[in-house]
Image: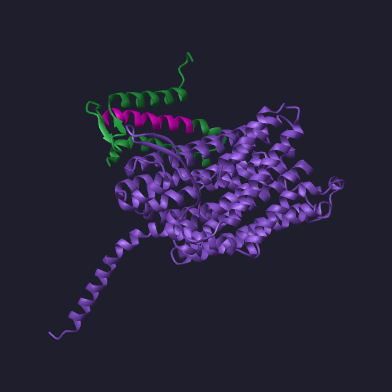
Amino acid sequence: MNASLIVLELAVVILGLVVLVLDWFTPAQDRRTLGYGAALGVGIVLLYSFFAFDGRDPLYAFGNAYVLDGLALCAGADHGHLLCAREFPSPSC
Amino acid sequence: MSLLSAIFLLPLLAALVVLCIPRNYKFVIRLVTLGATFASMLLALALFAKYNAAPVENGFKFVERHAWVSVSALKLDIGWHLGVDGINLGLIVMGAIVAFAAACVSREIKRLEKEYYTLLLVMTGGILGAFASLNLFFFYFFHELALVPTFIMIGVWGHGENRNYATFKITIYLSLGALIALAGLVALYLQSGANTFDIVELTQAVKARPLPLAAQSLIFPLLLFGFGILVSLWPFHTWAPLGYGAAPTATAMLHAGVLKKFGLYGLLRVGIPLMPDGAAAWLEILAFLCLGNIVYCGLVAMRQKDLNLLIGNSSVAHMGFIFLGIASLNIVGVTGAVVVMVAHGFLAALTFGLSGALREKTGTLEMEKLGGLLRQIPFLGAAVVMAMLAGCGLPGFANFVGEAMVLFGSWRVFPLVTTLATWGALIIGAIYMLRAVRKILHGPEKPEWAALKDASAWAKVPFVLLLAALLLLGVWPRLLTDKIQPSVAAILTMANTRAADKAPRAGEVKKAAGEAKQRAVQPR
């Protein structure tokens, strides 16, 4: 099994778990900062996805049920962008 | 319809019936709910009475199988497969009893009754269906079917100023946990190559061709943390006290008592037997994490001023014993863990039910405001004392049996953790439980509670039922343990395959040591 292919998913899951644990220690007035931190984390994963995979040759895992190609990377990047946009809305929003 | 199907389909059918009843027929709606949960409870008790521990092929009895979706081109095979063994039998019976008790205490709901009872019945059907399913698809589907009503019920019929925050928090935590567990289950399905969601077939396939270590090392932590969040494993436990504090009584009873055991059941049924090598690397970490549940959450419970928050933290602390029993991976410890799962289900339902009754009568759960209640409400007071003593692990209650077995089982494997857990259980647990009894029930009678009336005969029914179950399994634990042990042994046989594989290596070491000794005594 090529576990390195799902490194992006694992990174987001671990980020989520870290945010849940940090939420435990964070006072209510500082939770927005935690949200910024979470968005920053997703942004870093998003940036990493540009450099880690070029998306030219499709890569497969889990008996070909998991495909990492250009379309998958693009959809993942779009999702990451949406999450960041939720936390950093533009002034026009 | 088989006996097992009827146990969880009856509440689901009743939910459809309730939907068809006009909303002003409140009495009929409540009657249908009570009737369905009562019938489901009787059927579950009949299942328990009929079950015997004699070995059968694959270890499951009352098996029901129907093909549902089978697309060979997509390598997809989803079937309706139900069955019981010693592990889920107790959970199904406990779930059905708690569901009836939860329906009994739901009189506190005074608005949107039709929607409330529909959701309660869906939740009941979902919980019992998840435990009865031997197909990963339905196992997960029924869990989600029970989980969604939980969020809605807390949001709509919940209590307190923090209700909305609690709803969001519990939704985020449990959705994330369920999502991580789903990723693990899908990865398991794909990696096994068996092209089936059937747990029995998957087990046979993995037995014949074990998953590679790399896959196990990746999938097991997904299941551990996914299921762990659902069970409030420390440090992902913060949703539980807050959620239960805000939840309607019946929802807290059903979720803390029954639905929360889904994650533990998933670890026992799927995680450990199918990925023993992946589990081996994580069980020691799990043992130390469970200390966080037992000791840390116990200390947090000591600081609580609200009874529901105290019970919520205590419930999280009790989960630590189950994790410790599972981590011990021996027959005494794991059997004890299953006993605690059942006993804690009854106890959590009892304590949340009693706190709901106290809130209904006094309008508050702040322990400083309560006090001297035992003379005014002797039945409820005595039930609170018994519940708190059961929570301390007093002999005579089922919790004692389970916790003692867990501690005996884990002692050989994790002596330090067991020592600290025992301290947490005996000292910390006793302090917060007995302090709560003193604050709520003892002390001078307060004039504001002078007009309080004890529970009516009908209101006593759920508490008598739950206390009777705790006492019965406490004085006659073999009723449960004799059924659990063969199933646990089968799981441990699979889980300990890894140790068996290592045995030749141990033999080699012994042989090498013998040869070295021989060389040493030979004259040069």
Q: Which residues are magenta?
A: A34-52
The residue sitting at 76% across, 30% down in the picture is B25
Residue B518 occupies which quadrant of the picture? bottom left
Q: Is residue B80 left or right of residue B470?
A: left
- The rendered magenta stretch, by its main secondary structure, is classed as helix
Residue in the picture at 38% in, 57% down: B494
Residue A52: x percent and y percent? 26, 32
State left or right for residue B24 relative to residue A52.
right
Q: Is residue A37 left or right of residue B378?
A: left
Q: Colour of chain A?
A: green
Q: Nearer the viewer, residue B498 or B324?
A: B498
Quadrant in the picture for the N terminus of chain B:
top right
Residue B263 in view, yes or no: yes
Q: Position of residue A70 (x, y in %)?
A: 28, 24
Q: Position of residue B464 (x, y in %)?
A: 73, 53
- Tell me the residue at 52%/64% (across/down): B407
| Res. B314 visible in picture | no
Q: Which chain is purple?
A: B
Q: Is residue B213 positioned above or below A59 on the image?
A: below
Q: Nearer the viewer, residue B348 or A27?
A: B348
Task: State yes or no: residue B339 in magenta.
Answer: no
